[in-house]
Amino acid sequence: MVNKSVIQSFFRRLVPYRLWVQVGFLAVWLDPLALRMHNICGPVFHCYACPLAAFACPVGVLAQFSALHLIPFIAIGTLVLAGALFGRIICGWICPFGLFQDLVAKVPVKRFEIPRWLGAFRYVVLVGAVLLIPYLFGEGHPLFICKICPAGFLEKAVPDMGQAAIIGDPIPWPNTLKIVVAGLVITAAFVTFRPWCRVLCPLGAIFGFFNRFSVFSMEFENHHCTQCGRCRTLCTYGGKPDKSPNSDNCLRCFECTQCDAEALRVSTVFDKDAESESEPRSSQT
């Protein structure tokens, strides 16, 4: 019998408490100490214009630097490092906008599944709204990512409108397109799981690319699988973890590892190195 790694045992115990882990990280992104380190990029989708934002938004930084025809080396380095270490674990466990959608998903309504191929639109948003449009047209273009960002709507526009209404000032309405996009994303979050993360998030596109190469990855052990299909049932995001455990669509919630057969497990590059080193020894005995 293959011994489970320490990291696998750790995540199997932690998965039932994933929501609480997300809430814990929310305290980091909302900056309870009021440090406001906006010269540093966080690795999550969180509007830096939010009154409580601790770090700069990496997506916004990429777009703004593209508009200036500059390369944000520190922001890119932050994303590459985070992606190489964790892949989309950041999406499943750390991102505050992911937490918002998971909380909305607690509302007991019937949900429908969205086609997996729609995930390709994440790359359209990344290349178009984050890089190409800012580079060609600057920040004034209506499709500049910050002008249509649903996180910016919830974290900046809504607090500003609420504050203005309380003190009796004119309400600073966001642009129509941002209202429409945010309305569609929020509405979709009630009827399907994590629509922004799965279909449109440019940060998810970046981290999804690293799923196959990150320090943490998923491993499917076919000899343990009983073909029960429970891993697919556990995956609320419509994945096929037994077929493509390291797909760029996987949000790394690790719910599929809760299958009793334990055919799917969280592994690291160190596990793989240890296994490859042990194979020659076993063949010699």
Image (cartoon, rainbow, N blue to C red):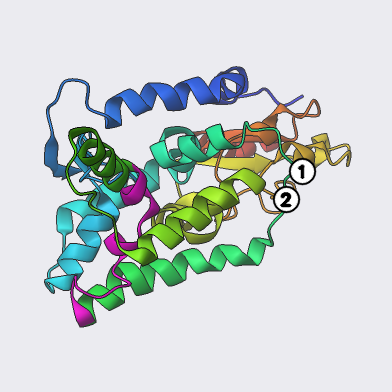
**Towards the viewer: 164 or 83:** 164
Identity, as a three-letter code, of the amino acid under mark 2: Lys
For the question of whether residue 98 can be seen, the reply is yes
Tell me: 235 left or right of 266. Answer: right
The answer to which image quadrant residue 51 occupies is top left
Number of callouts = 2
Numbered circle sitting on residue 232: 1
State the extent of the magenta-drawn residues as a range. Answer: 137-154
Tell me: 184 left or right of 152. Answer: right
Do the CB atoms of the residues marked 2 and 1 lie less than 8 Å apart?
A: yes
Identity, as a three-letter code, of the amino acid under mark 1: Arg
Using the numbered discs, state the Cα–Cα distance from disc 2 to disc 1 in whole angstroms: 6 Å
Residue 140, compared with residue 46, is above or below; it is: below
Numbered circle sitting on residue 56: none
Helix, strand or loop at label 1? It is helix
Residue at the farthest bottom position: 136
| Point 34% across, 44% down: residue | 82
Instruction: Please state the horizontal and vertical placement of residue 172, each as a whole percent of the image.
Output: 22, 52
Residue occupied by mark 2: 240
Residue 152 lies in the magenta-colored region: yes
**Towards the viewer: 222 or 11:** 11
Instruction: Please state the horizontal and vertical placement of residue 21, each as a whole percent of the image.
Output: 46, 23
